[in-house]
Image (cartoon, helix red, strand yellow):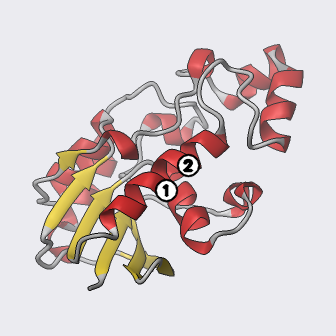
Amino acid sequence: MTVRLTLVPPAASEALREVRFDADGPLDPAGLARAEALATAFGPATRAYASPSARCLGTARALGLRAEPAAGLAGCDMGRWRGRTLEDVAATEEAGLAAWLADPEAAPHGGESLRDLRVRVGAWLDALREGSGRVTAVAEPDVVRAAAVHALGVPDEAARRLDVRPLTAVHLSGRGGRWNLRIGEPLTG
């Protein structure tokens, strides 16, 4: 039995444009309008999930999905960096930021490491693979990167090299203990 998962990063928000460690801010009006225009992009899904953030749940609603919030799809817990811009963190915690950028096991912000994120998302993916059918999940960009790294079985450092754009589709199909990946498909309404 095969599960076919489509991961969709949420619509644009102010935090994304500001290169800010998101503090669960809402979608901006343009991002919301773009998501609403893409509501016809999805065929029937047996299940729909979303990261529990306001922007992922809002994107899912705008896309016409009845998505169940999934804790396993929550974005990385950025601890005390939450809500701050990358520029601000670089100016005040240069060594901590350098460690975080160099080592996927580092969590100088007091939150979750990127490795921990990948393990959590991987556990969600592997549990999902036990079923079958079409699944759609609106998930934070870091979650989409973690899912791709887990599916391919590549080192955690590879996540930093993946560019995840808003409202695109990343397709995973899983069966027999492995995942196949198709990335970067634009959504069309």
Q: Which residue is mark 2?
A: 119
Q: Say which quadrant the C terminus sits in.
A: bottom left
Q: How many marks?
A: 2
> In terms of image quadrants, where is residue 187?
bottom left
Is residue 164 positioned above or below 75 on the image?
Answer: below
Q: Secondary structure at mark 1?
A: helix
Is residue 18 positioned above or below 171 on the image?
Answer: above
Name which residue lies at 42% across and 83% down: 176
x and y percent of residue 107 in the render? 71, 27
Q: With 113 as the anchor, is 121 left or right in this view?
A: left
Of residues 29 and 26, the one nearer the viewer is 26
Q: Which residue is mark 1?
A: 122
Name which residue lies at 34% across and 70% down: 129
Q: With 149 as the anchor, is 75 left or right in this view?
A: left
Q: Amino acid at mark 2?
A: Val
x and y percent of residue 25 in the render? 37, 28
x and y percent of residue 66 in the render? 10, 54
Is residue 183 positioned above or below 74 on the image?
Answer: below
x and y percent of residue 28 in the render? 33, 39
**Can residue 41 be seen by looking at this rendering?**
yes
Q: Secondary structure at mark 2?
A: helix
Of residues 120 and 166, the one nearer the viewer is 120
- Mark carried by residue 40: none
> In terms of image quadrants, where is residue 34?
bottom left
Name which residue lies at 80% across and 14% down: 92
Tell me whether circle 1 and circle 2 mark residues in contact (CB < 8 Å). Answer: yes
Q: Disc 1 and disc 2: Cα gap in Å?
A: 5 Å
Q: With 55 as the anchor, is 182 left or right in this view?
A: right
Is residue 146 positioned above or below 131 on the image?
Answer: above
Q: Amino acid at mark 1?
A: Gly
Name which residue lies at 13% across and 59% down: 65
Q: With 9 as the anchor, is 76 left or right in this view?
A: right
